[in-house]
Image (cartoon, rainbow, N blue to C red):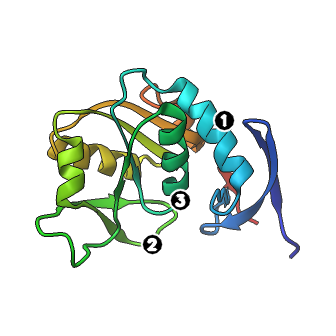
Amino acid sequence: MGKRFYEINVAGCKRKLHVINLNDEIAIAGFIILGDIELTEKTAAALAAKAPADTEVIMTAETKGIPLAESMARHMGLPYYVVARKSIKAYMENPLVVEDHSITTAGKQILCLMDDDIERIRGHKVLLVDDVISSGGSISALENLALQAGGQVIGRLAILAEGDAAKRHDITYLEELPLLKAE
């Protein structure tokens, strides 16, 4: 079978996304911003324009959200952003840890924050950022971490809302991304 593609136009960037079967019924269009500077910069600028003005901290999950959060922080004039890591590192003395379930990652994974990032969040207004929100598992895990760290979640932004996530009223996104039929 030949390769399948799904075309998208987001923040003025047209891209052909590879379609990947998740199982015998569902396929997704793989949206990868890593390495795509134009896409990262343009979507970050568009999301920064939609961000609450009183945002004090941007928080994202490792890995694909990192360049997006970094670019958004620059656009918004913020001095730093926080990354929830997918494993506990040796330099984390007292990490906060939550479980995460994602349709694109097999099995359970964890998200964790180190001491310095907990202090950056505590008592501050936190904006959660992700590249794609689909099932909502990752954004829920981020919110749980932010709340445990003593932050106040004031928004949830994503480049794309996939499938039923586009029906949610608690997220802001740039474009919809449908779930596709597997072939």
Q: Is residue 173 visible?
A: no
Please state which of the two labelled residues, at mark 3 or mark 1, is closer to the viewer.
Answer: 3
Q: Quadrant of residue 55?
A: top left
> Which residue is at the front of the view, 1 or 147?
147
Q: Are marks 3 and 1 in contact (CB under 8 Å)?
A: no
Please state which amino acid type lies under the numbered disc 2: Ala
Q: Indicate the position of residue 120 as horizontal and vertical percent values.
A: 23, 45
Q: CA distance from mark 1 to mark 2?
A: 26 Å
Residue at screen point 22% across, 79% down: 90
Q: Residue at x 42, y 28 (%)?
A: 170
Residue projecting furthest to the bottom: 90
| Precedes in sequence: disc 1 or disc 2 | 2
Q: What is the secondary structure assignment of the residue under circle 3? A: loop
Q: Which amino acid, mark 1?
A: Glu
Q: Image height check: is 90 above or below 63?
A: below
Which residue has dot 1 on it?
A: 175
Q: Mark 3 or mark 1, which has the lower sequence index?
A: 3
Q: What is the quadrant of the N terminus in the image?
A: bottom right
Residue 30 in view: yes
Discs 1/2, front: 1
Q: Residue reaching furthest right?
A: 2
Residue under label 3: 64
Q: Quadrant location of the C terminus?
A: bottom right
